[in-house]
Image: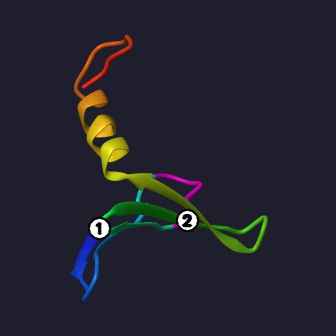
Amino acid sequence: MFTIEHDFDATVITLVDEGGQPLMEDVTVNAFEDCVTVEQYDPQRDEVVRVTFSLTQVRDLGAALNLPEGVYRL
């Protein structure tokens, strides 16, 4: 399951794990004008962990999901 919300400065996508046990914490993707962040709560550290992607990295990730193994430059 996932939700999509449009805030003032970002589109927020939340991915909810509904699979088998053990369930993972929700993942939140924030798409801003100049970057994309991915956040997930880490119960062992008791904090939210954030990874920030540039728009170029997001483009490359999207392309990589549809390519066979190898090294590429777009």
Label 2 SS: strand
Q: Residue at x 48, y 58 (%)?
A: 52
User: In the rendered structure, which segment of residues is drawn in magenta?
Assistant: 20-25
Residue 46 pos. (x, y %): 75, 74
Q: Which mark is residue 17?
A: none
Instruction: Tell which residue pokes out farthest to the right in this image.
Output: 45
Label 1 SS: strand
Front residue of 7/28: it is 7
Q: Which mark is residue 2?
A: 1
Q: Residue at x 51, y 65 (%)?
A: 39
Mark 1 vs mark 2: in front = 2
Image: 63 above or below 51: above
Q: Amino acid at mark 2?
A: Gln
Left or right placement of residue 54 versus residue 33 in this view: right
Quadrant placement of the C terminus: top left
Find residue 70 and report its image quarter. Answer: top left
Q: Could you tell which of marks 1 and 2 lies nearer the N-terminus?
A: 1
Can you identify the residue that label 2 sits on? 40
Q: How is the image coloured?
A: rainbow
The residues bearing labels 1 and 2 have C-alpha atoms spaced at a distance of 14 Å
Residue 68 pos. (x, y %): 29, 14
Q: Amino acid at mark 1?
A: Phe
Q: Residue at x 38, y 13 (%)?
A: 71
